[in-house]
Structures are given as structure tokens and as C-alpha cells.
Image (cartoon, rainbow, N blue to C red):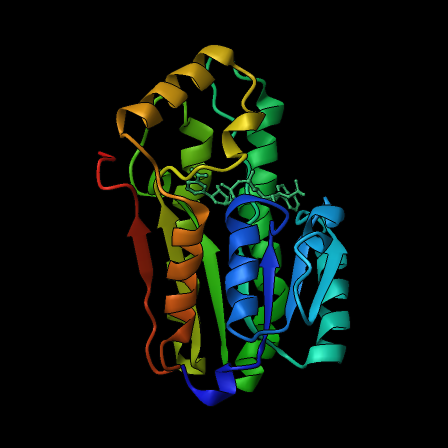
Amino acid sequence: MTSSQNKELVVITGASSGIGASMAKAFSHAGHPLLLLARRVERMEELKLDNCMTAKIDVTDLDAMKAAITKAEAKFGPVGCLVNNAGVMLLGAADVQDPAEWQKMVDVNVMGVLNGIHSVLGNMKARKSGTIINVSSVAGRKTFGNHAAYCGTKFAVHAMTENIREEVAPFDVRMITIAPGAVETELLGHTTDKDIVAGYESWKESMGSVIGPDVIADAALYAWQQPKSVCIREIVLASTRQE
Ligand code: NDP
């Protein structure tokens, strides 16, 4: 890590649980001021991190996200790193799943990521400095049963990240995809089909154990802490036993 990266503002979406909360702790312990964004603001405040602003934000609301970032930049200076982590996974069979669930995943997992990028990219290009880490999934690299819409959104995260990386490389802006395998968090809890949830749980049990969110947080911090002349484009990581 270069000294200038030491104290730059880091914005993390979906920091109220799971991977985002672990990332907030990891980046805070590395000395960064933070802006944490999610709807359950009380969960982010309970983390009790130093130099940490929180805002009750739905990532589908571009204006609200921009306003929160402007406020944090007034206090902590320009955003050095944005982590687009917020996401939802609603598994279902394509012929029976409520289309409202597909729409929700597209809104949060795709539009939410684009909203985050849109909120910071102009300033990063102007400053010729900045890093955007988008959290995708192994489900953005291969498909799984009952994951059609979720996989679609995560394949999109890979494509968008790489496309924008090519666009902004001349501006010294880094675009990074982190693609975790199964991680023990609240993510599965939003799927309504009980048989699919049970099948997913037994798939996780078949691996012995899945990785914890701190492993993903460490990977994000590692990618960020490389010298700014180095862009780790993608990290795919999962339990050794995950196929
Ligand atoms: P969690 O359900 O524990 O966390 C999801 C986070 O996203 C919460 O903080 C939630 O906050 C936030 N979020 C959801 N919807 C919105 C919204 N509309 N606006 C703002 N924030 C929102 O799951 P994970 O920690 O596992 O998920 C984090 C990311 O990791 C996701 O993108 C997920 O797809 C990805 N991932 C997870 C894997 C896993 O196995 N757990 C595997 C691969 C990828 P709140 O509800 O307070 O708004």
C-alpha cells in the first residue's frame, strides 16, 4: 500500500451484514475513514467503527447515494475506494418464480452497482485515481440450478466491471471484481422456496464448511492495497471443496 492510500475514504454498500460488515471492519482496522450504506442503518452503527459515517440508503436510489457520498467527501476528502457489495439472491425455478423477484435482483445487483459507479467515477477520472471493487459471485462465472436471474445479474457484474475497466484504465482508475463462492451470511434467508433453501443448505453441508465473510474482506483489502500501478482485475475464491 502506498502512503497516500492509507487514509483515503472507502465507501461500502451493503455493510449492515455479512461480507459488507466484515469489509467495513477490515478497512477500518487498516486506518480508513468509511461511509457505510445500507437500509438497516442501526446494524452499521452497531459496528462502532472510528471515523465512520453511515447512511440509510437503498442502492437503487441514485440521488440518495450521490448525496451521501458528497456529504462524506466534505468530511473525509475524495473517495479512494468504492465497494459495491450490496446484493440480493432470490432463488427460484424460472417457470414459477415471481417476476417481482427477478426485478428486485436486477434493480439491486445490476442497477445498484451502476448507481455506485456513476456516483464516483467522474471524480475518480478527473483525479486520475480511484478504485471500484464490485462483488460478484462464482455464480457470475458458472451457472447453478434455480439461479437463472441471480446468475444473470452476477454475470452482468463481471461484464460491466471489465468493460468499464477498459474504459477507465487510461485514467488510472482500477476496476476489480471479487467473486466469492458460498459464504455463511444472511443471503440465502431471502429465498422463499423452502425446498430450494433446504437443497442449498445440504449442498453447503456437503462441502464440510463454507468460507466466512472475513475471507472475502481480506481479499478485497489485498486488492486495494496493491500499488496503484497494479490492478488485480478479478479474484475468484471459494471453499476448497466447492465444485
Ligand atoms: P447479506 O444478506 O448478509 O448482506 C447483503 C447486504 O446487502 C446487506 O447489508 C443489505 O443491507 C444489503 N442490501 C440488500 N439490498 C439492498 C438495497 N436495496 N439497498 C442497500 N443495501 C442493500 O449477504 P452477503 O453478505 O452474502 O452478500 C454481499 C454480497 O456478496 C452480495 O452482492 C452477494 O450477492 C455476494 N455474494 C454472496 C455469497 C454468499 O454465499 N453469501 C456468494 C457470492 C457472492 P440492508 O438489508 O440493511 O439494506
The x and y percentages for residue 228 are 39, 81
Q: Tell me if residue 137 can be seen.
A: yes
Q: Is residue 138 above or below residue 216?
A: above
Q: In this orientation, which residue lies closer to the viewer: 219 or 149?
A: 219
Q: Is residue 130 left or right of residue 170?
A: right
* Residue shown at 50% from the left, 37% from the top: 185
Give the quarter the ligand 1 occupies.
top right
Q: Quadrant of residue 55?
A: bottom right
Q: In this orientation, which residue lies closer to the viewer: 153 or 136?
A: 136
* Residue shown at 55% from the left, 65% from the top: 82
Question: In which quadrant will I find the N terminus?
Answer: bottom left
Q: Is residue 156 left or right of residue 63?
A: left
Q: In this orientation, which residue lies closer to the viewer: 201 or 101?
A: 201
Farthest bottom residue in view: 3
**How many discs mark residues in the rendered view?**
0
The x and y percentages for residue 92 are 47, 19
* Residue shown at 49% from the left, 66% from the top: 132
Q: Is residue 141 left or right of residue 107?
A: left
Q: Tell me if residue 93 can be seen.
A: no
Q: Is residue 145 above or below residue 132?
A: above
Q: Quadrant of residue 75?
A: bottom right
* Residue shown at 75% from the left, 63% from the top: 68
Q: Quadrant of residue 145?
A: top left
Q: In this orientation, which residue lies closer to the viewer: 171 or 57?
A: 57
Q: Is residue 168 above or below residue 54?
A: below
Question: In which quadrant will I find the C terminus?
Answer: top left
The x and y percentages for residue 45 are 73, 54
The x and y percentages for residue 198 are 43, 15
